Amino acid sequence: MLKIVIIVLAIVVLLVLWLVSSYNGFVRLRNKSEEAFSAMDVSLKKRYDLIPNFVETVKGYAKHEQDTLQAVINARNMAMNANSPEQKIANDNALSGTLKSLFALTESYPDLKANQNFLSLQNQLSRIEEEIAGSRRYYNGVVNKYNTKTEMFPGNILASLFGFKRKPLYEVNSDAERENVKVSF
């Protein structure tokens, strides 16, 4: 009888240890994904701060391209004011598309491409875009691990029990965003 009690007690202890370990794993991955999103958000904030300077520089050379410039500013404002990660991802994808249009527009203005202030802003924006791309890759890697853990058995039972839900990946959602920017002179 004592052996049965010891065996049952050992099984209960192992089950509790697994439960604690799994729960802590979920918390660790959730926190890492939030940290990764926050790091990406810092890079996005740098981009948001740089865009008005970039647009103002282009404005001086491309006065009749007001629609493109306004689209960039509107997309920036929407991205800055997003409330949820899903909104932030969708709005940032839209901003990336309008920035591509702005870069394509600048190809039509040789004087602008020779302007030192413009070149400096363009280099800064390029570096920030590289930071954002790296942050997105890291975020997606962490979120992929988290999502896999929330969906695989037996972790999915624990995830639903404690309210751990899938997180959105940072991905291109529309065909328009996948197309190359058309540059015409």
Image (cartoon, rainbow, N blue to C red):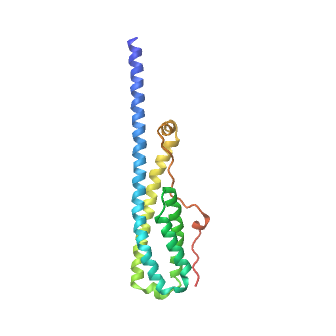
Locate the N terminus and report the quarter of the image it occupies. top left
Position of residue 122 relative to residue 14, above or below, is below
Q: Nearer the viewer, residue 150 or 80?
A: 80
| Furthest-top residue in this view | 1
Indicate the position of residue 94 as horizontal and vertical percent values. 54, 67
Q: Quadrant of residue 122?
A: bottom left
Horizontal arrangement in the rendering, residue 173 relative to residue 124 (left or right): right
Residue 99 visible in the shown view: no
Indicate the position of residue 99 as horizontal and vertical percent values. 51, 73
Indicate the position of residue 130 as horizontal and vertical percent values. 43, 67
Residue 157 visible in the shown view: yes
> Which residue does the image show at 47% across and 88% down from the upper left?
111
Position of residue 20 relative to residue 185, above or below, is above
Position of residue 89 relative to residue 145, above or below, is below
> Which residue does the image show at 42% across and 20% down from the upper left?
8
| Furthest-bottom residue in this view | 111
> Which residue does the image show at 52% across and 59% down from the upper left?
87
Indicate the position of residue 69 as horizontal and vertical percent values. 52, 78
Count of labels in the image:
0
| Furthest-right residue in this view | 175
Q: Quadrant of residue 25?
A: top left
> Which residue does the image show at 51% across and 47% down from the upper left?
166
Locate the C terminus and report the quarter of the image it occupies. bottom right
